[in-house]
Image: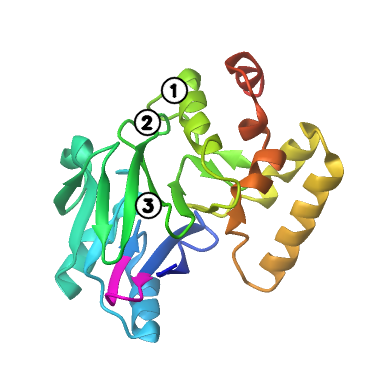
Amino acid sequence: MVLQVYPVLCRAGYMDNYSYILTESKSNLTAVLDPSETEPIVAALQHLKVTPTYIFNTHHHFDHTDSNRDLKKLYGAKVVANKNDSPRIPGFDIGVEPGKTFDFGQTKAHIIDVSAHTQGHILWYFPQDKIVFTGDTLFNLCIGGLFEGTTTEMFAALQKIRQLPEDVLFYPGHEYTLPSANFALNNASDSKEVMAYIQRAKERLQQHLPVAPIALGIEKKCNPYLRADTLENFTKLFR
């Protein structure tokens, strides 16, 4: 494992975005994923004493790309995003393709298309490091809204996440755990497991720590949208 991940809370109390600083220890490369707000990201980079070579985007929404151009100007970093969505990505430089990979030093990101929240939304999955960045597709105990896609597309996107190994840790694009708690409890197959999840989340947040990362094996059991095994059952959750 060569990838280190540092969450950066952005737009705190408003949208509660998470941007992430990724450092690849063997090659000393750094990337910022979904830079939402310049000031806290720059402060975190200075604290870590690293300079980003890349900016990775999961999708085009402003609260995931607003600092693309600022970080390019400050550090000369290259913006890497789905080439199929390049016209909507600020400062776009390098295109990646779903089904292919992107080399990040000694590790490798697998690019997975999860078009639903938006068309062209991608996951950044690092199998060697057992880490996946889900943007606005999967959150703790919930999922992203259907801005440009359908329930059928979102169900298909979540099946791709369900197929990833149980021990993969996922990092979402927002902190939405507690607002989703009651819905998860009301749709739980094992309320004790969900209650334990929520209690852990409360303890983390009280310490000003992010709830993520969570192993997908746990999320698959507690997140009602991931537990839905058929499109019919998935669709019922929207009623």
Image location of residue 145, percent across then percent down: 49, 33
**232 and 98: which one is in front?**
98
Pointers 2 and 1 in contact (C-beta within 8 Å): yes
Residues at badges 2 and 3 in contact (C-beta under 8 Å)?
no
Q: Which percent across, then down, holds residue 64?
A: 35, 52
Amino acid carrying label 2: it is Ser
Q: Nearer the viewer, residue 54 or 109?
A: 109
The residue at which mark 3 appears reads as 63
Estimate the spatial distance between the alpha carbons at disc 2 and disc 3, rounded to whole Å: 18 Å
Q: Which residue is mark 1?
A: 153
Q: Quadrant of residue 112?
A: top left
Q: Which residue is mark 2?
A: 115
- Circle nearer the N terminus (1, 3): 3
Q: Mark 2 or mark 3, which has the lower sequence index? A: 3
Residue 24 part of the magenta-drawn span: yes
Q: Identify the residue at horizontal 61%, vertical 55% (top origin).
A: 214
Residue at 76% x, 31% y is 187
Give amino acid for label 1: Glu
Identify which amino acid the numbered label 3 is placed on.
Answer: Asp
What x and y, as percent, mark residue 53?
21, 69
Label 1, label 3: how many angstroms apart (C-alpha)? 22 Å
Residue 58 seen from this side: no
Q: Is residue 160 above or below residue 218?
A: above
